Image (spheres, coloured by chain):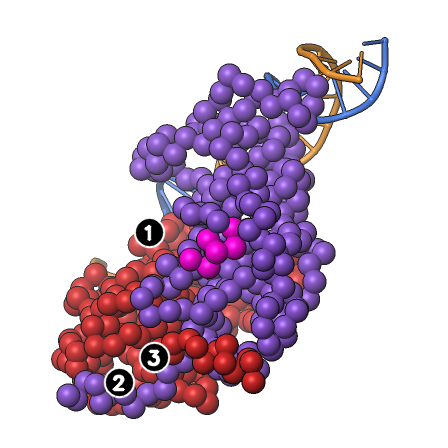
Chain colours: A red, B purple, C blue, D orange
DNA sequence: CCAAAAGTGTTCAGCTTACACCCATGA
DNA sequence: TCATGGGTGTAAGCTGAACACTTTTGG
């Protein structure tokens, strides 16, 4: 069998997945980190990760690893980069594929994370991480910033129902800028894919703010008729 | 040794690199494909690829593989995605990392490519490729389109010296749109990082067009003082 | 002298930005 | 009644898009 011989000549490598898990809490963007449970760098802060197994694709591996920490399925999850420098993991040659996830912090079950020593960190206050995980987070943040401007992925970080001020705070946290609230509301509502509900959120103010819902059907319709999302 | 045990439990995988090599020829964007030399799918068209070896990083592997086909070093090369679906290569489980390269077709040595059966294809006229290589090209093209609008990577596809009409044709080929030549020239020259030379390119017209050179120093200066490249 | 590509300014519309005051409510 | 955040409209400046004629020169 020529083909088997051709493949068999080559080396094989451990392949791992590392997940950058973003969450949003009132007004700050956070990342979920875990305490590493085995050597090398045991006890250090790291991204949640795990090794690829034979019976799953990369995307499936990322879903499995995300689920094992958060208990969440059907989460926004996107592949980022592949890291393969020779010494990146001092214990063995490991090729690692990074994914980032956007989750609703309210859905995240604190209890489950305990066994991994998981903790949310504001991005500016995160500890130094093992290997190239700091770089992974930097790149994930760049991607989130870029992509959230041209695609409505930010909604994955909010609850189903949210107010316009909450949405504005989210974009301000992601992009580290301040927006004028009149202009922001005008821009977002002019896109006509937020459905206004007859409910108010009253935790943040005495007056209360109307709740909205992202209407994916209207969004798709708009996109198909040439509309461009842009924040 | 606990750590060794932990790693050794896991499977290892073949890791490959596939290169999407873009070139630009007068007015069309092209991709360089090769005839596959071994089973499975022997004789079919594919991207240039190769297996990762122990002593090199992913980037080094991509450089080596690109060099083996084109004889070129110091080429614009950027990692794209990682492909790991279970059946993507029917012969074995292979995790493949795609890279795209932007080369100057004038530098490419036709002779070297012969041994791989390499051939340039216009994107619309390319044959069907093996495995997921068609998807890899689609994604590479999306990335090239997006990135060439906000970063001056397009110049990697032109010779050192080029005319404004050549540059315009390049952007028209990448983005599949027509630009108004007055607006295009105005926009590109207002950025002040093209150096006008005292030479004319006279192959394309009787009048001849002035040659320009991309001045990376001026470009960096502009970027550092807040300028945003945008086409 | 003519064909073929290079080169050159201005105008208008639409979008982005800046900006200040009233409203509703719980404590 | 007052403090707090929610909600609203308009004007000015700027940017992007549309548009036509002259220049050069080899054949």
Residue A178 image label: 1
- Residue at 54% x, 58% y: name it: B20
> Residue B57: which quarter of the image?
bottom left
Nearer the camera: disc 2 or disc 1 = 2
In the image, B51 versus C3, the foreground residue is B51
* Residue B207, image quadrant: top right
Residue where numbered disc 2 is placed: B7
Q: Residue A7 in the image: state x and y as whole percent.
A: 48, 78
Work out whether residue B115 or residue B152 is closer to the camera in this orientation and state it.
Answer: B115
Residues at circles 3 and 2 in contact by the CB criterion of under 8 Å: yes
10 Å crowding of disc 2: few (<14), some (14-19), many (20+)? some
Q: How far apart are marks 3 and 2 (CA)?
A: 8 Å
Would you call the spot at circle 1 few (<14 residues within 10 Å), some (14-19), or many (20 or more)? few
Mark 1 and mark 3 lie on one chain; the one further toward the N terminus is 3
- Find residue A201 and report its horizontal and vertical position in percent: 38, 73
Figure quadrant of the N terminus of chain B: bottom left
Residue A25 image position (x, y, % from top left): 29, 71
Q: What stretch is highlighted in magenta?
A: B64-70
Q: Is residue A44 left or right of A191 when viewed as pictured?
A: left
Q: Disc 1 is attached to a residue of which chain?
A: A
On the image, the x and y values in percent for residue A205 come to 31, 67
Chain of the residue on which disc 3 is drawn: A
Q: Foreground: A212 or B220? A: B220
Instruction: Note whether residue B33 is visible.
Output: no
Which type of secondary structure does the marked residue at label 3 adopt? strand
Residue A157 vs A111, above or below: the answer is above
Mark 2 touches mark 1? (CB < 8 Å) = no
Which circle marks residue A14 in the picture? Answer: 3
């Amino acid at each position: 069998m020529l083909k088997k011989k051709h493949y068999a000549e080559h080396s094989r490598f451990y392949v791992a997945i590392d997940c950058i898990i973003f969450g949003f809490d009132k007004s700050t963007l956070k990342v979920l980190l875990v305490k590493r449970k085995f050597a090398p760098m045991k006890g250090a802060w790291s991204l949640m990760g795990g090794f690829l197994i034979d019976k799953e694709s990369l995307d499936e591996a990322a879903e499995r690893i995300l689920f094992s920490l958060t208990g969440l399925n059907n989460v926004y999850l996107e592949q980022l980069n592949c890291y393969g420098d020779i010494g990146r993991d001092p214990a063995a040659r490991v090729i690692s594929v990074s994914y980032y996830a956007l989750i609703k912090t309210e859905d995240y079950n604190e209890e489950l994370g305990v066994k991994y020593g998981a903790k949310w960190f504001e991005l500016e206050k995160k500890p130094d991480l093992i290997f190239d995980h700091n770089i992974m987070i930097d790149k994930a943040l760049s991607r989130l910033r870029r992509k959230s401007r041209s695609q409505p992925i930010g909604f994955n970080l909010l609850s189903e129902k949210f107010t316009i001020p909450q949405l504005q705070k989210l974009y301000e946290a992601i992009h580290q800028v301040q927006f004028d609230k009149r202009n922001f509301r005008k821009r977002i509502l002019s896109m006509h894919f937020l459905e206004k509900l007859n409910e108010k959120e009253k935790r943040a103010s005495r007056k209360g703010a109307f709740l909205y819902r992202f209407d994916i059907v209207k969004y798709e319709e708009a996109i198909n008729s040439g509309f461009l999302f842009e924040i």
